[in-house]
Image (cartoon, grey):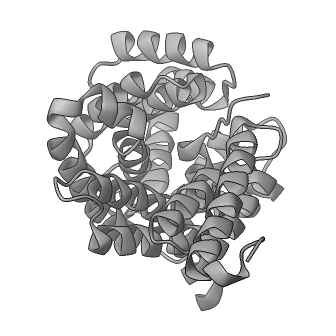
Amino acid sequence: MKPVTRVLGLVVLAVTSRGLYAQSAQLSAGQSPAAALCSVLRENYTNFQQCHSATQAQMCAMAQLENTDPTQARRFDAIMGETSPDKTIRLVADFVRKYPESTLLSYAYFFEANAYQQKGDVEKIVKYSDRSLSSDPNNLVSLILSVRALSMPQYIKSHRTEGGKILRQAQVEAAHALALVLEIPRQPRESEVDYHKRLAAVSSEVHGALGTVHLELASGGPRGLNKAELARAEQEFKIAVANSRQPDPRDYYRLGEAYGAEGKWDDAIQAYAKAGKIGQDTLISEYASEQIGHLKRKKAQSLAAANPTSAPGN
């Protein structure tokens, strides 16, 4: 059974830059994707300040370096194109040593955090997302990666004494990320409907993380489950799965947890079933099947308790 891996930041990069990649399709052969995209950005943006989204800001910086420091641009392009997480980590370390004042430093650290996401090392995801945000607090993709990592139950459990502080930080970063999403500019020839779908798809990552935050807050009180926090968790997960073009099975799984805690057995079973279907051949599929069996037994017990005369033998 394979573990679930999801390259959160790279998914966001693909979504936010998809329109620009389409525009660059007719550019000269032999150009790297980053170089081709930089060429398009040179035409559409006149200065760095006009680049409102993290992806476009990164590409604007790349476009400037193509002329001023092509060697640095090629080194960063190598980081962007590397698929091995271990090689990415080494490339970023070399880049940071060589260019400690680079305008691309925040994005280099993002790719390092993203590499640790692929390796499943949540501590390092948080560490390098934080370094990325220290360099550029408005790096949207790093904010999204950070919020997701901070809200992971295993990270909260390993920092139990600081749990409340971590969850507050996740909420602050999530609010910042959602505000930045609204600043992503509409692309040339992009319809109003497609534009808003794109923003919703990017923000779905944030809503999924917020759902996990509220689920943690719901179970962390001294008086048992907090119904208000459970309701908030349910709402955030519903937004996340509804707006995403490729819903994260973890969001459906945790939506099932929220429904189950609220006693919504059928809704919980349906959410777990979707988590298992999307996360087929992963650990989530196995866990979802176990939860479905557990909930069906719990539902049967609840119905039997509510209607004792209908039980066998009466």
Q: Is residue 267 visible?
A: no
Query: If the image is split into quadrants, where does the N terminus sit?
Result: top right
Question: Does residue 145 sit above or below 239 in this rendering?
Answer: above
Where residue 192 sits: x, y (%)? Answer: 59, 90
Where residue 163 sits: x, y (%)? Answer: 21, 40
Q: Nearer the viewer, residue 212 or 119?
A: 212
| Number of disc labels | 0
For this view, does 17 lie left or right of residue 157?
right
Question: Does residue 232 sit above or below 40 in this rendering?
Answer: below
Where residue 65 sits: x, y (%)? Answer: 45, 35
Quadrant in which residue 119 is drawn:
top right
Residue in view at x 37 percent, y 68 percent: 230
Specify the farthest residue to the bottom: 192
Where residue 18 sits: x, y (%)? Answer: 68, 60
Specify the farthest residue to the front: 314
Residue in view at x 22 percent, y 36 percent: 134
Q: Is residue 292 visible?
A: yes
Question: Does residue 43 sit above or below 121 in this rendering?
Answer: below
For this view, does 156 lie left or right of residue 23?
left
Residue in view at x 31 percent, y 54 percent: 219
Residue in view at x 45 percent, y 50 percent: 60
Query: If the image is split into quadrants, where does the C terminus sit?
Result: bottom right
For this view, does 57 lie left or right of residue 293?
left
Quadrant in which residue 98 is drawn:
top left
